[in-house]
Image: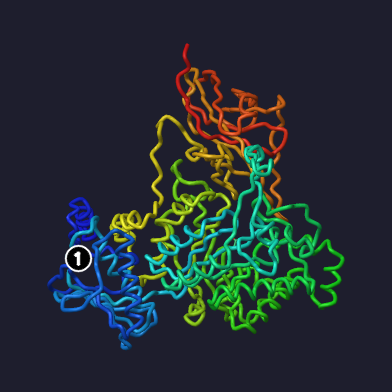
């Protein structure tokens, strides 16, 4: 038996015993840089005082946050005090590194020391983890040890997209709490996009009056009439400046910097819907876009548009005191710039070669503005195209190539590559996973991500500030699902960006995870635990094979019912086609197929997806089943007429005729157009009744 396995068993045994006794090996996540056991132990009980000198503000702040965490997590009720045998927080200038701390447990008490407030805070988090490794709120025995800890990377970020789906301010604070418990320190807040403008801007009230609201696509939402208006209910929301100030302070108290993202020049539909004069082409929307993907709307380059953006950024800088302001820059489709005579004339006048150079000029102009105000611009890796702005930091999302280029050019960079660190991807093929992108990004794959590309020289490596995991929310409608997409993967991510490579070990992490997840439960965080299948006979779309390798697999949520649990469909939106390998057709088979329809509300910018469904044989279309191939004559045709008027899922049945042996089954739909998009929820195959 390996040492790791023994530790795992000790932890599980400790949990099961529930005696409040600490297992021998602490279950800290992220694993500290160094942990040296010593002899003896210390029992922390409700009588143990928590001590910090009143003259030492950083220490008293850390002590208070520690007590807050203990209380919020229902752990041992501790109080401030002083005396021998205490938990002490002390500023110690001898500890080097702003985020470093030393945590010693000796028979006479626990001491957290650090030279800076962040280090003291991380020490507080570690003591809290030591005291919550097992359930309950009784006394805890801590084995003596010295932990010397500091992070590997300075930028340990999570992005939450509040534009595609809005989360409440209360949820944002919880999200920040959960990040802080993992010593993550950058909350990248994606606040504006085509689908919503979420930040109150005093100068431009229509940004939120218009741009924060939309009617979701699809028949179900169109039929959901709001009695107050007699029109389809609008969804959305925004954060007032007062709420933002509170959230920023809340994050700062937890040593988390919020990096706000204000997207430009693309992903700007919500803003342009509110103020059409900002756009490069006419727009016909009275709210944010109900469509996902890469839209054509892009800001124009009039001086008035820069006045708008600079005014917005002035309010943004007033709200967010951190050094970095993210201005997007990704996926700006240039068609409207190409088609506009005024913008073409401007390109000429500026002596630029093309639209990419115009975007680079745009970003440089914004960067100069931010630099004048003492801030740093961050943008997605598209800001490298056409020449990067002088002080810009590159967030590499199209793989890590952008980071490599940026580092070669002497620019700071953050690794946030899709799909490896995109938490909108599902975590497993289990049908109980929340909706999202369809690639499987497992907990282990996040843990094993390499944040130090070997092709960079040591000097270039220094430009890698760190890494970031991104949770975009096109398909993450609920806060509960946002939590499940982010956790526990954020724990694997946190260890990857904090812990020195030599101390990382997947098996060891896995052994610490149960205690970590038990802490989440204490903090009210329901992480991802896909429910087992209610009926094992059902084969859900997530368990079927897509017919061809796909660039666009999505796990789409049904648009109905409006309230309650919705079906989820694994679907390739460029080729909706599912296969069930090796079905036994030696006797007639009763097929039940549960199908649903979702709006086809995807835009693809300059790279259109040319999906055309097979033509229907009846007005409502059909589900067709073929054997051995996806071409040729179907062996069964199931009319969609009974499903067409049902916004949620519908069960269809057919008998598949006998043919010798096993056969791959192929499922496709016929329909008049691609909207709505039909999809399989689940199927069962049973012997047909004679
Ligand atoms: C991105 O995912 N478009 C940054």
73 relative to 201 in the view: left or right: left
Q: Among all residues in the image, which is located at the extreme left?
A: 40
Residue 454 visible somewhere in the drawing: no
Q: Residue furthest bottom?
A: 94
**Quarter residue 447 falls in:** bottom left
From the image, tell me which residue sits under label 1.
Answer: 46
How many labels, in total? 1
Based on the displayed image, in which of its 4 quarters is residue 559 positioned? top right
Q: Position of residue 337 (x, y in %)?
A: 79, 64
Residue 103, placed above or below residue 447: below
- Judge whether residue 519 can be spotted in this image: yes
State the residue at coordinates (72%, 59%).
Answer: 274
- Check the image and tell me how it is coloured: rainbow
Residue 334, given in percent of the width and then of the height, sits at: 75, 63
Q: Nearer the viewer, residue 558 or 511?
A: 558
- The secondary structure type at the circle numbered 1 is loop
Residue 393 screen position, x and y as percent: 58, 76
Label 1 packing within 10 angstroms: few (<14), some (14-19), many (20+):
some
Taking depth in this image into account, of 360 and 216 the one nearest to the observer is 216
109 or 60: nearer the eye? 60
Q: Is residue 451 above or below residue 682?
A: below
- Quarter holding the N terminus? bottom left
Q: Is mark 1 within 8 Å of ligand 1?
A: no
> In the figure, residue 352 lies in which quadrant?
bottom right
Q: Position of residue 72 (x, y in %)?
A: 33, 61
Left or right for 429, reference 522: right
Quadrant hosting ligand 1: bottom right
**Residue at the farthest front position:** 228
């Amino acid at each position: 038996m390996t040492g790791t396995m023994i530790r795992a068993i000790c932890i599980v045994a400790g949990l099961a015993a529930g005696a409040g006794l600490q297992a021998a090996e602490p279950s800290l996540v992220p694993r500290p840089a160094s942990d040296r056991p010593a002899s003896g132990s210390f029992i922390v009980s409700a009588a143990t005082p928590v001590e910090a000198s009143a003259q030492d503000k950083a220490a008293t702040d850390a002590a208070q946050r520690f007590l807050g965490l203990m209380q919020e997590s229902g752990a041992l009720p501790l109080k401030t005090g002083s005396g021998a045998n205490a938990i002490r927080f002390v500023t110690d200038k001898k500890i080097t590194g702003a985020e470093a701390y030393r945590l010693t447990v000796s028979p006479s008490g626990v001491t957290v020391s650090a030279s800076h407030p962040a280090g003291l805070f991380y020490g507080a988090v570690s003591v809290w983890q030591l005291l919550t490794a097992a359930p309950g709120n009784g006394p805890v025995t801590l084995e003596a040890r010295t932990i010397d800890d500091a992070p590997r990377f300075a930028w340990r970020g999570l992005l939450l997209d509040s534009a595609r789906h809005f989360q409440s301010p209360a949820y944002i604070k919880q999200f920040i709490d959960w990040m802080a418990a993992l010593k993550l320190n950058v909350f990248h807040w994606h606040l504006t996009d085509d689908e919503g403008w979420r930040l109150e801007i005093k100068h431009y009230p229509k940004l939120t009056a218009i741009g924060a609201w939309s009617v979701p696509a699809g028949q179900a939402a169109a039929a959901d009439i709001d009695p107050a208006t007699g029109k389809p209910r609008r969804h959305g929301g925004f954060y007032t400046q007062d709420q933002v100030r509170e959230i920023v302070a809340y994050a700062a108290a937890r040593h988390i910097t919020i990096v706000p993202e204000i997207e430009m020049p693309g992903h700007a539909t919500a803003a342009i819907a509110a103020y059409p004069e900002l756009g490069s082409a006419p727009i016909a929307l009275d709210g944010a876009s109900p469509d996902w993907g890469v839209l054509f709307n892009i800001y124009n380059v009039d001086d008035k548009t820069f006045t708008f953006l600079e005014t917005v950024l002035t309010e943004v800088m007033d709200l967010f005191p951190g050094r970095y302001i993210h201005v997007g820059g990704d996926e700006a489709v240039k068609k409207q710039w190409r088609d506009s005579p005024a913008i073409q004339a401007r390109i000429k006048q500026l002596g630029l070669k093309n639209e990419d150079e115009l975007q680079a000029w745009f970003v440089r102009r914004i960067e100069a503005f931010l630099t004048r105000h003492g801030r740093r611009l961050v943008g997605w890796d598209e800001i490298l195209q056409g020449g990067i702005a002088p002080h810009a930091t590159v967030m590499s999302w199209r793989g890590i190539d952008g980071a490599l280029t940026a580092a070669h050019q002497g620019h700071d960079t953050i690794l946030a590559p899709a799909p490896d660190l995109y938490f909108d991807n599902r975590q497993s093929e289990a049908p109980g996973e929340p909706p999202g992108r369809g690639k499987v990004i497992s907990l282990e794959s996040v843990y094993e991500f390499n944040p130090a590309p070997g092709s960079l020289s040591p000097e270039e490596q220094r430009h890698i500030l760190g890494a970031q995991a991104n949770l975009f929310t096109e398909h993450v409608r609920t806060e509960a699902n946002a939590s499940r997409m982010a956790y526990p993967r954020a724990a694997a991510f946190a260890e990857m960006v904090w812990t020195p490579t030599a101390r990382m070990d997947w098996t060891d992490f896995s052994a610490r995870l149960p205690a970590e997840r038990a802490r989440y439960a204490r903090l009210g965080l329901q992480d991802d635990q896909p429910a087992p299948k209610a009926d094992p006979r059902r084969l859900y779309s997530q368990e079927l094979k897509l017919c061809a390798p796909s660039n666009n697999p999505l796990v789409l949520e049904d648009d109905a019912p409006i309230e309650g649990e919705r079906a989820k469909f694994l679907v390739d939106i460029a080729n909706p086609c599912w296969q069930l390998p090796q079905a036994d057709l030696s006797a007639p088979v009763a097929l039940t197929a549960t199908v649903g329809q979702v709006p086809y509300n995807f835009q693809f910018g300059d790279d259109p997806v040319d999906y055309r469904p097979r033509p229907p044989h009846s007005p409502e279309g059909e589900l067709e089943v073929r054997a051995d191939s996806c071409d040729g004559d179907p062996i069964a045709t199931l009319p969609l007429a009974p499903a067409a008027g049902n916004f949620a899922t519908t069960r269809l049945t057919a008998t598949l005729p006998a043919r010798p042996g096993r056969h791959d089954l192929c499922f496709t739909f016929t329909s008049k157009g691609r909207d709505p998009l039909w999809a399989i929820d689940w199927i069962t195959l049973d012997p047909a009744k004679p």
